Every structure is written in structure tokens, then in C-alpha cells.
Amino acid sequence: MMDESRRGFVGKAFGAVAAVGGIASLIAMKKTWDPLPSVMSAGFTTVDVSGLEANKLEIVVWRGKPIFVLKYSDDMKPTDGRSVKIGDSYFSVMIGLCTHLGCIPGYEGDTKLFKCACHGGEYSADGKNTFGPPPRPLDVPPFKLDGVTLVLGEEGPEYKAMMAKA
Amino acid sequence: MAEFKKADSMLEWFDQRLGVVKFAKVMMTEYWIPKNINFLWAMGVLLTVMFAILLISGIFLLMYYKPDINMAFDSVNYTIMQEVGYGWLFRHIHAVGASVIFLIIYIHMFTGIYYGSYKRGREMIWISGMILFMLFSAEGFSGYMLPWGQMSYWAAYVITEIFGGIPLIGGDLVVWIRGNFYVADSTLTRFFMLHVLLIPLAIIGAIVLHFYALRFPHVNNEEGEFFDFDAEAEKYQEGKHKESKVIPFWPVFLSKDIFVLGVFLVFFFYLVFFHYGFAMDPVNFDKADNLKTPAHIYPEWYFLWSYEVLRGWFFEIAGVSGKSLGLMAFGFANAIFLVLPWLDRSPMVKPANQRPYFKYWFWLLIADLMVLTLFGKLPPTGANAWVGFGASSAFLILFIALPFITAAEAKKVKGQ
Amino acid sequence: MKEFKILAVLVVLVGVLYYGIEPYAHSVMHPEVAPANFNFDDLKNVDTSIKGNGANGKVLVEANCIACHAIEKVGHLQLMPNADAAAAYGVTPPDLSHAGRIYDKNFLANFIFDPVSALHLEHKYPVGGAKTFPMPAYNWMSQQDIMDIVVYLQSIAPKVLDDKVGHAITFKAACGRCHSMKYGTLEATTPADALKTYMGVTPPDLSQHIKSRGEHYLHSFINNPQVLIKGTAMPRVGLTEKAQEEVIAYMEEIGDSKKEERETVGLWVMGYMVVFALLAYLWKRQIWKKVH
């Protein structure tokens, strides 16, 4: 006759081993779905801002996302914690995706507003949400300044200072 | 092994080895269905046929489709639509079928709600059905991405972005689902895998469960009447076909279903050949461009109601952002149907119109879902946003009120 | 009877949903615009009732146009390869062989007088602005001379057949300098990078525009792009109604090449299903007679 308690023990041990194997498999499967290392490290985008025209939106691509770089004209006031001083001018550097559901707003030079065509959201030139469904201002991508060159994807002191204020 | 005697016929040969005679009885000729039904009872067979049509057309599309962001669009719109013999036919059938199957799913689902076919023993039928609804939704969503048009891309973008609203893990979860920071090649290939393998397998499993779940509580009937199926089946087998309350699945029940199917397929093929724009959105014939949003982004029609529940919450309430509120409402809306059998606290199994309070609830729900669907497509500006908020709130209130309404109904009915 | 009542309820509910989601929602998202105007009535600089003289037109064309434009039909070949022409002018100048046929007379005359206003591109080339349109205005020419040129161009334009080959010729002449048609293996004559610089955006490939935009939209858009997309870089091209129809026909022949097959097969399949449904009904009646 099989000892009941021993069968209980073997059963439990077997169950535990099966559980460990199952969990390990799940972890492996989760990892398979993770973004690839090449995607995670996918380059840094550099932008030379010296040639940009004031009040005209420049869009560059960083990690598949449009990045807005807007040079302020003389009548536009910089906002603490949102505007970046590069050289003598101020700039807005923002991820150009509406914080509502990710559409790309367009910039209207006359009204100095970003308007999102999808759900009617509006942002001021410094990216603050001023109307409609967006829950927060346009996000600022991590950046570093290198003279008049903007390096997207790396956190420089200017970015950290901005984040501290915002 | 017992010795088999030599079979006298092919049927006997198979019967010895597979028990086909018994199997045919259990599945067809002695599977009893109530007689007191109308054409709404044919929707299950329609759905099975539609699923088969989608599966077959999908197999043919699979032979030329290329799940790669540089090739997907042209493989669909040039290779399949213009080069492959009848490739266009399979694409039209697949696209229109995917849209129309949801119409039938909704009719099937609301037939169940109307006749109270989800309670008093039929809970597992309802739950397996709702699991099928969710699987079909995932199947529809993942398939819509594959042609890699503008609406494929942006609907995928907006819907995956919804998961970003989940506290703490949201941002990472979105990147994990997409396999990239944006909807990219990795997203397309993994959704391709889900669409052609994993979800269809799960659907087939859930269909088996759904059919199996029908066996014990039996199919409901037009009056919600409970009767002894064995006794009625015996009557039928004695030849009292007219007195018996049941009919066999084959040929009686299916003969009606096949007629309904025939009428439906006339309508379906009209849509496939001549009126397919509702299922093959023009915007999707522009190739996906991650730097250019279409002027209007909207999901396929069958997701509009839950999309509007999400969108209806566009302002902050008590410090909680509109986006979070919308996400909560959206989660609620998609999960709540699953527990319907326990929200309905009245034991009455009757058509809704014969239930004193439930009938108002049912038709209000239909009206609200219609409003949500209609406004889900319109741009959410001005008054539309408030209609969306009202309809979204009404949806939540209806479900929160349901246990109280039905409890009151139970009391009233008992008092009579 | 009861089943018909149920069916009626279903039809009404589905009908309302369909109407709201499709025709109604689309009419809200894409409001109707002014109907296409193929007389280009807004252009009044040149009096087109003046009777032109083709012989004088020929002299004027040879003196004024062929320095930049080829007219292969009468032997004036293209002066330089497309890439060089695009580098010199911004965009490859059109061959004028078909100009007299595909462009409306009033449009063509007024275009020669002042290209920018005819094209509706004042927003891109404002008077005194930094950029100038590659072709100069011939507003110093007499109205008679302009009409002579128009008549000459009309006289040399070859007829094309009303088939796919003819439609392709019209498409190439009208659209092919900027737009590619990948599915018809047509590539824009202006190189892509030059186009991007010249237009500000890359003009889209038109292979699937018959589906993504539809005939109705194209009918208005080609006639006057600004009424549908304000500020678009696409000029008004001034096609006659017939030329525009040929362009759209070509887009359909390339972008929806199976249309005819679809509509024929569709009728057969629906006919088959009707027979199927009728037989199914008779069979059902036969079987249910025994149980009712």
C-alpha cells in the first residue's frame, strides 16, 4: 500500500516543480514580447537649431515620434520650466503628440496655437494645454544641449532643471 | 480488444470504429431544441457559418499577405486585390464578413438579454458567449491592423495608447504591447500572429465550450417556459410530432436556420460586392504614415459604443483626470456584461416585454447604445461632447440600477 | 406575423445605426463644397471670344515657349534630361503636345496671362514674395496673341482613344510630372527630392486614390483643390471636364482594376443565393408542416 502522506508529499513536490517551470516559461514568453535591444537603444537624434526660422514649426523624428522644435519670435515670451534657451533665442522642444490620444497637432503661426484635428485639443506655443480634452501639456522629450545642437534621448542638465520646475 | 465482426456496409465499418451512429444521434437527430422559437434563434448557426467563411477567406488571404510594414500595404492592395485570381473576392468577403459578424453577434447577444436566456442554469452559456465576444473583438482589432493603412495604424495607435492610462505600469505596458515606442514592424508581426493563430485557436475552443454549455440547461424558447425535455423528446419519438414541444436539431431546426441563412447571405453578398465602404474605410487605402494623422480617427462601427463610453469623460472630476475616468468607464463597460446573470436579481425568465420593470431597462439600454454608437463616430466637439458624457453616464447608471430594478420586479411579481 | 414584427424592429434599428454611422457622419466630417466649375469663370484677364490665328500662334510659340517647353508632337524635343530640368526650374516643365486638348480654353489663356492666379497659388507665390513661379506671366502680350497661341496649341493636340492607353496619356500629361502611379508603373517625371523641395511636401502616389478619395471627391478636388484643402501645395490644373474624366477613369483602371469582374460576379452570386434561399424555404415548409 502506498503511504498516503508520502503520496501527498510527492504530489506537492511535483506540483511545486510544475509551478516553477510554468512561471519560468511565462517569464521567457514575456521577455519575447519585450522591445528588442536595438529598438531600446535606437539612436539619439541631433538637431542643429541655428538655422531655424522664428515662429515656424520644425518637426524632427525621434524614436518614431515627431518632435516639435519651435523658435520663438521676439513677441513670444518664454515660460519658466517649458522654454529652452539655446544661444540667444528661446525654443519649445516637445513631443508632437497630443496628450489626449496621440494625434499630431498642427501649428498655426497666426494664432500661435497648436491645434489637434482629432478631438479639438489646443495648446499654446509653449505646449500648455489651453482647450479641449488633453489632460496635460505636450510632453518634453529628454534632451541635452551641445552648443547650438539639440541631442534628443539624453538627459542633460537643462532638461533636469526644466523637469524640476515643471 | 474485442473482436470486430466483418462490417456489412461502410456505415457499419465506421460505426464499429468511431460510433458514428450514436454520435449523429447525440449531435443531430436526437439533440432537442424547443419548437416555440422565431428566426432570432437562427443567429447561432449564422455565426458559425460566418466564422467558417472568415476562416476560409482568411486562409486564402494568408497565402499572399506579407506581415512587414514595407510590404503589407502593397501585398493587400496590389497583389491580393489586383493580381491574385479572385483575391479581391476573398478580401472583400473577409473585410465585410468581419464587420457583419458583429451585427449578428449583437443581435444574438441582445436576443439572449431580451428573452432572459442568461440565467437560471444558463449562466455558462452567457459567460462563454461573452468570452467569444471578447475574443472576436480582439480578432477584429488585430486584423484591422494588417492592411497597414492609415486607419489601421492610427486606430492601433489610439487603442494601444488607452493602456497607457493604467496607473504605474501604463507607459511600460504600451511599449511592451507594441514592442516599440510606437506602432512599428514589431507590432504588426505580433498582431499578425495573434490574428491568424492564437486568437482563432482560442475562438474555436470557446465555440466548443459555448455549444457544450447548451447541452445541460437546453436552449431557451420564446416564452421562457421550463419543461421536461426528456418527456417531450419521448413524445416526439413516439411520432406525436405536433404535440411535442421539441424538435430535433436535424433536420427540423436546421431547415429553418438554413432558410434564414439563405436570406441573410443574399444581403451579405450584396454588401460584399456592391456596398462594402462601411467595412473597408476609404482612409485605409492610404498607406500608414506615423507622422501624419488622418483628420478623423474612429474605430470600426462595432467598437463605437465602448469608444464613446471612453471619450465621454473629457473633464476632470474631483482631481481625477478625464482620461482616467474614461478608462475606468471603458473597463466597466467591457466587463459588466460578463456578470449580467448576477445583476438581474429577478428569477423571471420571460421576454423583456412581459416583465414589468425590466422592459424599460432593456429598451433604455438599446437606446443608449444606439446614441453611444452614433455619437462615437461624430467629432466630439461642442454639444456632441456633452451628449457623449450623458450617454456614457447613462450606461453606467443603467447597469448600477439593474440589481435594484430587478429586485423590485421580483418583489412585485411575487406579490401578485 | 410576429416574426415580421421582429424583423421590422431589427430593420429599423439597424437602418438608423447605418444612416448615422455612414452617410450622416460622413456628411458631418466632409461637408459638401461648391460644385466643380469647368468654365473657370473666375478668370477674366483674357477675352476668350477673340478668334485666334493658329499660324501666328505657331510663330509666337516658337519664339516664346520652346526655350523651356518641349512639344514632341511637332518635333521640339525635350532639351535636357528630367533631373536637369527639375534642377533648373524646380519641376520639369510640361511638354505642350497635349496642352490644347486637356486644358480648358479659358484656363489656358488666363494661365499664359498670369500663371499664379490661374493655378490658385497666390498663397505660395505672393506678389513680391521670396519665391517666384518658374513660368513668367505673359501679361504684356496682347489678348489677340494669347488667343493665337491657344488656338495653335489646340490645333496640334493629338486625339487619344477612350481606352486605358488613351487615359494613361492624359494622366501623364495632366498629373505625371508630380505624381507617381506605382501600381501602373508610372513614376513622376520630376525626381522625388526635387519635388519635395519644390512643393514643400512629397505629392502622394495616386495608385489607390480612387479608393481612398473616391470619384466624388476627386471630381471636386482636381477641379479646384483649394476648396477642399485650404493652403494645399497642389495647384488648380485647369483640366476640361473630359480630360478630368479620363484622368479619373485611368485612376480607376489602375486602382480598382477588378471593378467589372466584381460587379458581374456579384450579380451571379446574389442570384445563386436567391435560388438557394427559395429552395431552403420550400424545404423548410415541407419539414415544418409535420411538426406544426
Image (cartoon, coloured by chain):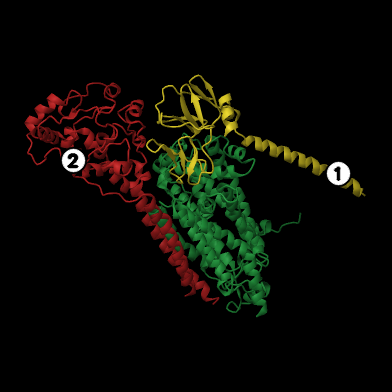
Cα separation, mark 2 vs mark 1, equals 94 Å
Q: Closest to the observer: C41 or A88?
A: A88
Would you place residue C181 above or below residue B357 in this image?
above
Residue A16 % position (x, y): 80, 42
Q: Which residue is pictured at 58% across the width and 43% down the height?
A: B194
Task: Report in which chain the residue with disc 2 lies.
Answer: C
Q: Which mark is residue C130?
A: none
Q: Which residue is pictured at 43% across the width and 29% down the height?
A: A72
Residue C101 % position (x, y): 18, 38
Q: From the viewer's perspective, tell me whether residue C209 is left or right of residue C159.
A: right
Q: Which residue is pictured at 49% across the width and 74% down the height?
A: C2
Would you place residue B378 above or below residue B229 in this image?
above
Q: Closest to the observer: C235 or C5?
A: C235
Q: Nearer the viewer, mark 2 or mark 1?
A: 2
Residue density around tag 1, few if under 14, some if 14–19, many if 20 or more, within 10 Å: few
Q: Which residue is mark 1?
A: A10
Q: Closest to the observer: B221 or B251?
A: B221
As drawn, the chain in yellow is A
As shown in the figure, which amino acid type bears the numbered disc 1?
Val
As drawn, the chain in green is B
Task: Report in which chain the residue with disc 1 lies.
Answer: A
Contact check, label 2 and label 1, Cβ < 8 Å: no
Q: From the viewer's perspective, tell me whether residue B258 is left or right of residue C153.
A: right
Q: Which mark is residue C43?
A: 2
Q: Are the residues flagged by discs 2 and 1 from a single subunit?
A: no
Residue density around tag 2, few if under 14, some if 14–19, many if 20 or more, within 10 Å: some
Query: In the rendered image of this protein, which colour is used for chain C?
Result: red
As shown in the figure, which amino acid type bears the numbered disc 2?
Leu
